[in-house]
């Protein structure tokens, strides 16, 4: 990775992530691991499919107005995808955690803003049938901007897909709710605001998606009770 002027930033279950530059522009390099427990040909095929799906979802999301990092380069042989680095930003998770020390009125106002904007970007994705697959507060970023309100970016489309199925969109919302409630106890009262924002942006199908979301949530609860 030295040849790309990048240094290791973080490492997950699926990939190593590096920060660096790409032709002078701040960039993120994601290098997917080889799965030693899988047959090499199958692992290569699945990895290439996932990388193509990630790049396709990023480009489609960007084309419909969802704030996402630009795709700069894909190297299928080396399993590397290079995207733009979102500067002057923290994850939504970090932002919410930082609100603990703030005044209650400011905290509530900020959470309302976040829910409104997150609902909007998820609705924009679903209107174009983009399923993120891993909507968590760590996979969204809040970017500070001069003289403008902050912008919510969606990142890490490594599990994304394109689907018109209401079920898939409902599951996306369920994963997002679980991420909020699991990582940020005490803010459950704000999540309906996110859903209302989602409905405003996606009026043609939000009611069906929200109904499916409730069904998925009920199935999740039953699974926990049985387990």
Image (cartoon, rainbow, N blue to C red):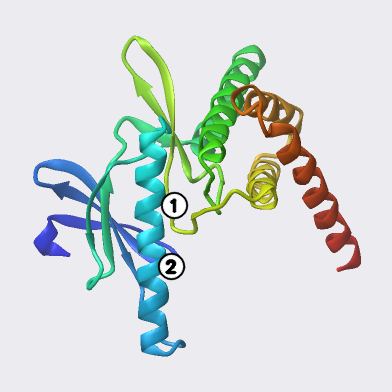
Query: Is 87 on the left-hand or right-hand side of 207?
Result: left
Front residue of 197 and 162: 162
Q: Is residue 132 visible?
A: yes
SS type, badge 2? loop
Q: In the rendering, at what x and y percent does residue 188 appear?
A: 75, 34
Q: From the viewer's perspective, is the residue at label 2 or at label 1 nearer?
A: 1
Relative to 155, residue 55 above or below: below
User: Which quadrant would residue 26 be assigned to in this image?
Assistant: top left
Q: In the rendering, at what x and y percent does residue 98 appear?
A: 53, 30
In the picture of the structure, the residue carrying the numbered disc 1 is 157
Front residue of 13 and 43: 43
Q: Residue at x 66, y 16 (%)?
A: 104
Relative to 193, residue 158 above or below: below
Relative to 189, residue 208 above or below: below
User: Which quadrant would residue 146 be assigned to in this image?
Assistant: top left
Relative to 142, residue 58 above or below: below
Rounded to the nearest angstrom, the CA distance separating label 2 from label 1 is 12 Å
Sort mark 1 into few (<14), some (14-19) or many (20+) by Cα contacts within 10 Å: many
Sort mark 2 into few (<14), some (14-19) or many (20+) by Cα contacts within 10 Å: some
Q: In the rendering, at what x and y percent does residue 132 appear?
A: 52, 49
Query: Is 54 on the left-hand or right-hand side of 168?
Result: left
- State if disc 1 and disc 2 touch (CB < 8 Å): no
Q: Residue at x 81, y 43 (%)?
A: 214
Front residue of 154 and 42: 42
Image quadrant holding the C terminus, namely bottom right
In the picture of the structure, the residue carrying the numbered disc 2 is 14
Q: Residue at x 85, y 51 (%)?
A: 218
């Amino acid at each position: 990775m030295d040849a790309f002027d990048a240094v290791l930033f973080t490492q997950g279950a699926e990939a190593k992530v590096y920060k660096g530059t790409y032709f002078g522009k701040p960039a993120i390099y994601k290098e997917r691991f080889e799965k030693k427990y899988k047959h090499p040909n199958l692992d290569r095929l699945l990895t290439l499919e996932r990388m193509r799906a990630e790049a396709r979802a990023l480009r489609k999301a960007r084309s419909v107005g969802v704030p996402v990092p630009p795709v700069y380069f894909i190297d299928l042989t080396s399993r590397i995808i290079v995207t733009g680095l979102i500067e002057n930003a923290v994850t939504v998770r970090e932002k919410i955690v930082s609100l603990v020390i703030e005044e209650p009125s400011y905290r509530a106002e900020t959470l309302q803003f976040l829910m409104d904007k997150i609902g909007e970007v998820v609705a924009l994705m679903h209107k174009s049938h983009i399923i993120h697959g891993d909507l968590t507060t760590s996979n969204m970023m809040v970017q500070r901007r001069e003289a403008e309100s902050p912008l919510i970016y969606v990142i890490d489309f490594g599990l994304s897909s394109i689907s018109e199925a209401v079920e898939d969109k409902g599951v996306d919302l369920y994963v997002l709710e679980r991420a909020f409630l699991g990582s940020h106890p005490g803010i459950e009262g704000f999540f309906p605001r996110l859903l209302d924002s989602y409905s405003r942006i996606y009026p043609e199908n939000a009611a069906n998606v929200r109904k499916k979301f409730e069904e998925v949530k009920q199935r999740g609860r039953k699974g926990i009770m049985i387990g």
